[in-house]
Amino acid sequence: MLDDEGRAVGPWAEEPKLSFDELREGLEHMVTLRIFDERMLLAQRQQKTSFYMQHLGEEAVSCAFRRALNDGDMNFPTYRQAGLLIAGGYPLLSMMNQIYANAGDPTHGRQLPVLYSAKDHGFFTLSGNLATQVPQAVGWAMASAIAGDTKIAAAWVGDGSTAEGDFYAGMVFASTYRPPVVINVVNNQWAISTFQGIAMGGSETFAHRGLGFGIPSLRVDGNDYLAVYAAARWAADRARNNLGPTLIEHVTYRAGAHSTSDDPSAYRPAGSGSAWPLGDPIARLKQHLIVSGEWSERTHAELIAKVTEHVIETQQKAEAIGTLHSGSRSSKKFMFEGVFEEMTPHLQRQRKEAGF
Amino acid sequence: MNRPTVRREAEAKAPTTTKRMTMIEAIRDAHDVAMAADDRVVVYGEDVGYFGGVFRCTAGLQEKYGPTRCFDAPISEQGIVGTAIGMAAYGLRPVVEIQFADYMYPAYDQLVSEAARLRYRSAGDFTCPLVVRMPVGGGIFGAETHSQSPEALFTHVAGLKTVMPSNPYDAKGLLLAAIEDPDPVIFLEPKRVYNGPFDGHPDRPIVPWKNHRLAEVPTGHYVEPLGKAAVRRPGTAVTVVTYGTMVHVSLAAVSESGIDAEVIDLRTLLPLDLETITQSVQKTGRCVVVHEATLTSGFGAELVALIQRECFYHLEAPIFRVGGWDMPYPHVHEWNYFPGPERVGRALRAVVEAD
Ligand SMILES: Cc1ncc(C[n+]2csc(CCOP(=O)(O)OP(=O)(O)O)c2C)c(N)n1
C-alpha cells in the first residue's frame, strides 16, 4: 500500500482506514518495541538476563495486527510478537519483570525470557516448542464457535516452523471446521541460519500452503503498517462473520540476529541486515505521516525521546525489583506450585524434602 | 446461540438405581451424564461422532447432543490433542479419544510439552481441563501397533494425571471425575476387559460382565475420586499391586495358586494411593507388582522404588515384578507375551516361599 514516497495507494488503501491519530499511535507502538528491544538486548549483554530475541524489522507485523483484534480475542503467538502486547497496552514493566525473572515476573520465573503469558491481553502462554500453538489456536477458535461466541483466535508461526507437523494439523482442522481463526505465517526469510526456501520447498510462497487446504490466503508486505492492518482487518472480519479461517503470509525481514545466541554474519551476506530489504517499517510509516502533513522530523525526534525516557524509567523500576542474578526473584515456593490445581501427595512430599 | 453453561441438577440427584453395563456402556454413559450436565463438555476423535468410535464408546452421543458437541476428527492425533488444548484453554471441557493408545505418539508433544505444562508455565493464567481417552493393552491379536500399554510415558510427565479402571463401575465414576478435574487426565481403557472380565486364559471366552458385582453401575451422576486404590481381595500372605486387565489376571492367579494374597487395584497411577499399598505391604511383608506394559523402566519400577522406601523394614522377601517382555507386542505369539495367571502365580510362589 505504501509506495516509495510513502503515499497510501491502491484499492486496499481505501477501506478500512486508520485515522492519523491511530497511525501516530501505531508509530509509537513500533518505536516503543524497537527501543524496548534495544534496552533488553543491552541488558542481556550486561548479563541481567540470560537471553533475548529482538524484532528489528518486524515491528509492523504484530503492532498493526493487534489493531484488528478486539478485547477477548486470543493470540497464540510465537516469540517475535511482543508487539501484540505493546500495542494492546500490556505494561512494559511486566514484560521486563518476565525477562529478568524477578519477583514481579507473572510466570514466577518459570519461563525463558520473552515467553510471556497474558490471558487478559489476549496473549496465550508461549511454548518453546515451535508450531504447537497452531492447532491450539484453531481449537480455541472451534471452542468459540461451539460456544456461539464472537471472539476470534490468531495463530502465529515462523516461516521455518511451517515445516512442523503441527502446522499442517492445525491447517487440516481449520479447513475442516472453518472456525474463526487467522493463521499468520511470519516470513522473515530466515529460520536461525536456514533460508526460507528450506521450509518452503517447491511451492512459490507460504500463502500457497493455504490454498491447498481451501483456506483463503493473503501475502502481505509485512513492513507496511497499513497493509498489515488492512489484511488483518479483512481476515478478522471474515472470522467474526463466520466466514472461516484465513492464512496471512507476512513477508518481512529479520534485520537482526535470530536471538542473543547467534551471529547472522556467519550465514547471511554481509550488510544485508542494514540494507533493509522491504524498508524499515518505522521509517516507512513515518514517511507516510510526513507526506500526509501529519508528522515531522521534529515530532519524530520528540517521540523517540519520550519513549526512550519511558522505557528507561520502566527498566529502572524493573531492575529495582531484580534481575536474573541480583535483587529479588520469584519465591522458591512457586517451584512446586501449579503443576496441578491441587498439590498431589507426591509433590507435597518432594517439597518438604526440598525444604520449601 | 447461548454461551455454554453448567447444569448441576444432575449432580444434586444422587443415583438411586443401578444398571448392569459393560465397561464400554459405562464409559458411554459417563459421557452422556457429563454432556447432559455441562454444555462445556465436547467429545471428538477419529470415528467418534457418526459411528460412535471403533469400540462404540461414544455411540449415540452425536444423535443426542448434535454435531457441535460430538464429532468426527481428521486422522491427526496432534491435531486432536492440540485443538483440545485450545478448547480447554478457552473454557470448554474437551474429551478426546485416541483410537488406540499406540497412536498417541504423534500427539505426544502436545501432551507432554503443552497440556501438561500449560498451568505451570502460565502461572495459572491458562489451564487445561482435558481428558484424553485411549484403549490400551493386548490380547486382541492387534500385533505391535494395537496392543501397547504406554502408561509409564504419561506418569513420567509432570502435570498429567493417569487413570486406568478395571471394571465398569470404576470406569464411569473415574471418567466423570476425570472430566470434572481441573487438570489434564489421561484415561486408559484396557480394551481386553471392555466386554467382560478376563481371567488371562486365552483359550477361554471372555466372561460377560452380566453377573459381575462391579458391572452394577449407578445411573445418573457419581464420581470415584482420582488417586484412590481399591482392595479387590483381602489377604495376608502377599500383596499384589496391579491395575487394568491385570487385576483380573492377578485374581485368577491368586485363586489358581491357592495363595492368600491381597490384590490392590490402583485405578489411578498418578496421583498414586501409596497409603493403601503401604498399609497392605506392611501387613503382608511381601509384594508382587503386575502390569502388562514392557518391564524395563515400566511403572512397576516406580512402584517397587516407593514400596521399598515405605516398607523396607517390613519386607520379608524381595519385591517381584511381572510385566510384558521387553519387545514390541508379537502378533501370533501375543499369548506368550501377555503376563498370564501362570506367570503371576510363579512370582507369587517365589515371593511367598522366599525367606
Ligand atoms: C520443535 C522445535 N524445534 C526446534 C527448535 C529450535 N528453534 C528455535 S527458533 C528456531 C528457528 C525458527 O525459525 P522461524 O520459524 O522461521 O521463526 P523466526 O525465528 O525466523 O522468527 C529453531 C529451529 C524449537 N524451539 N522447537
Image (cartoon, coloured by chain):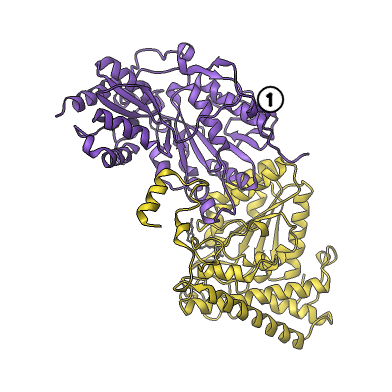
Chain colours: A yellow, B purple
Task: State whether residue B289 appears in this view.
Answer: no
In the rendered view, would you say A300 is above or below A13?
A: below
Give residue B333's quadrant in the image: top left
Residues packed near mark 1 inside 10 Å, few (<14), some (14 to 19) or many (20 plus):
few
Is residue A12 depicted above or below B314 in this figure? below
Instruction: Tell me: residue A330, above or below residue B4.
Output: below
Looking at the figure, which quarter contains the C terminus of chain B?
A: top left
Horizontal side of A8 relative to B297 (left or right) equals right
Left or right for B350, reference A203: left
Residue A126: x, y in percent?
56, 58
* Residue at image mark 1: B63
Instruction: Locate residue B266 relative to residue A280 in the image: left or right.
Output: left
Residue B148 position within the rendered picture, expressed as x and y whole percent measured from the top left:
40, 33
User: Residue, x 23% and y 35% (percent of image)?
Assistant: B314
Instruction: Please report the residue visible at 51 percent of the width from the left and 32 percent of the height from the top.
Output: B99
Can residue B73 be seen by looking at this rendering? yes
**Nearer-the-camera pick, A256 or A201:** A256
For this rendering, which residue is in front, A74 or B219? B219
**Image quadrant containing the N terminus of chain B:** top right
| Front-most of residues A256 and B193 | B193
Badge 1 residue CB within 8 Å of ligand 1: no
- The part of the image, by quadrant, that contains residue A249 is bottom right
Q: Amino acid at mark 1?
A: Glu
In the rendering, at what x and y percent does residue B273 appear? Answer: 40, 36
Q: Residue at x 60, y 49 (%)?
A: A136
